[in-house]
Image (tube, rainbow, N blue to C red):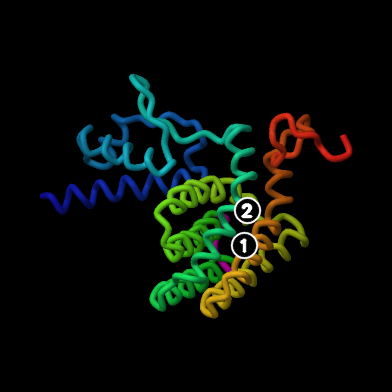
C-alpha cells in the first residue's frame, strides 16, 4: 500500500510539473484540492505534502487560508529573470565543465538526442520539456548546493516563456531553434573537454539566442523600459 500511495503521489507531482511548465495550467491559477485528491486517489495530507515540496522548488505559492496556486509570472519576476539568467547560466556551465562525471556527460548526450528528436517531430511542449531536461542535467553536473535551487527556479520560468520559442513561426525563428540545438552540442563538447571558459561563453551565446524573441513576446506594447533595466537606471538613448 505504501508503494501504491507513493506512486499516486509521484503521478500528481509529475502531472503538476508538466502542466505548469507547458502552461496547461496558467501562471497564477488556483489549484483545486478536492478535484486533485479525487483524480489521483490521495487524501489531503499527502496532497499537501506534494504542494509543499513544489512550493519549495518554485512551482507553487502557498497562501494561508487560501490554498495553493501556480507561481505567477509578473513584471517583477520577469525583470528578475532577465537580470539573473545570464549570470546563473554562466556559473552553472562553468562549474559543470569542472565537475561533471562521465555518467553525467552520457546522460546529457541522451538528453540532447531526445531534444533533437523533439525538434524533428515533437510538439512545442515536447521541445520545451526536452530542452528543460538538458539544462536540468547541467545543473546537477555543477554540483553546487547554493546555485542549484536558484537555477532550477530559473528553469521553471524559462520553460514557460520558451513555449513560444519552440513554436517557431518564421524562417528566422526556425534558424534560431536549429542553432540552439547546435549550441547544445558545443556545450557537451566543452564540458567533456573540461573547458570552463568555453562553457561559460556558450552559456551567454545560448541565452542571447532566445532573449530577443522572449523579450518581444513578454513585453507589453506600452512598456518602453527593457526588462533587464534596474529600477531608477537610465535607459540608453532615453
From the viewer's perspective, tell me whether residue 113 is left or right of residue 165.
left
Outermost residue toward the left? 1
Looking at the image, which residue is at 54% across and 64% down?
93
Looking at the image, which residue is at 66% across and 66% down?
201
Badge count: 2
Q: Which residue is mark 1?
A: 203
From the viewer's perspective, tell me whether residue 209 is left or right of residue 131.
right
Residue 147 location (% of width, % of height): 47, 52
Residue 130 location (% of width, % of height): 50, 62
- Within 10 angstroms of label 2, few (less than 14), some, or many (20 or more) residues? some
The residues colored magenta run 120-124
- Within 10 angstroms of label 1, few (less than 14), some, or many (20 or more) residues? many
Task: Kindly state the secondary structure of the residue where label 1 is placed.
Answer: helix
Outermost residue toward the right? 237
Our reading of the magenta stretch's main secondary structure is helix
Looking at the image, which residue is at 53% across and 54% down?
125
Q: Nearer the viewer, residue 188 or 1?
A: 188
The alpha-carbon separation of the residues under discs 2 and 1 comes to 7 Å
- Which of the two labelled residues, at mark 2 and mark 1, occupies the earlier sequence position? 2
Indicate whether 218 appears above or below 198: above
Indicate whether 105 appears above or below 29: below
Q: Nearer the viewer, residue 154 or 238?
A: 238
Quarter that holds the C terminus: top right
Residue 237 location (% of width, % of height): 89, 39
Looking at the image, which residue is at 48% across and 46% down?
153
The quarter of the displayed image where residue 47 is located? top left
Q: Contact, CB < 8 Å: mark 2 with mark 1?
A: yes
Indicate whether 18 appears above or below 106: above
Q: Nearer the viewer, residue 89 or 213?
A: 89
Q: Which mark is residue 86?
A: 2
Residue 180 location (% of width, % of height): 64, 65
Q: Which mark is residue 156?
A: none
Amino acid at each position: 500500500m505504501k508503494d501504491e500511495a507513493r506512486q499516486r503521489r509521484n503521478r500528481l507531482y509529475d502531472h503538476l510539473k508538466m502542466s505548469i511548465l507547458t502552461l496547461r495550467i496558467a501562471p497564477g491559477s488556483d489549484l483545486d484540492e478536492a478535484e486533485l485528491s479525487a483524480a489521483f486517489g490521495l487524501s489531503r495530507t499527502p496532497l499537501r505534502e506534494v504542494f509543499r515540496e513544489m512550493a519549495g522548488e518554485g512551482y507553487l505559492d502557498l497562501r494561508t487560508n487560501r490554498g495553493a496556486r501556480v507561481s505567477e509570472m509578473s513584471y517583477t519576476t520577469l525583470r528578475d529573470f532577465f537580470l539573473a539568467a545570464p549570470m546563473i547560466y554562466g556559473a552553472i556551465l562553468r562549474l559543470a565543465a569542472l565537475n561533471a562525471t562521465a555518467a553525467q556527460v552520457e546522460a546529457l548526450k541522451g538528453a540532447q538526442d531526445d531534444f533533437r528528436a523533439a525538434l524533428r517531430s515533437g510538439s512545442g511542449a515536447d521541445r520545451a520539456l526536452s530542452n528543460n531536461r538538458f539544462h536540468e542535467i547541467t545543473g546537477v553536473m555543477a554540483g553546487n548546493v547554493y546555485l542549484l535551487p536558484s537555477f532550477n527556479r530559473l528553469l521553471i520560468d524559462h520553460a514557460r516563456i520558451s513555449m513560444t520559442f519552440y513554436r517557431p513561426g518564421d524562417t528566422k525563428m526556425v534558424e534560431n531553434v536549429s542553432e540552439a540545438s547546435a549550441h547544445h552540442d558545443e556545450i557537451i563538447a566543452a564540458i567533456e573537454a573540461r573547458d570552463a571558459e568555453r562553457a561559460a561563453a556558450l552559456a551567454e551565446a545560448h541565452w542571447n539566442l532566445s532573449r530577443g524573441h522572449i523579450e518581444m513576446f513578454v513585453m507589453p506594447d506600452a512598456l518602453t523600459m527593457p526588462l533587464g533595466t534596474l529600477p531608477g537606471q537610465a535607459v540608453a538613448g532615453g
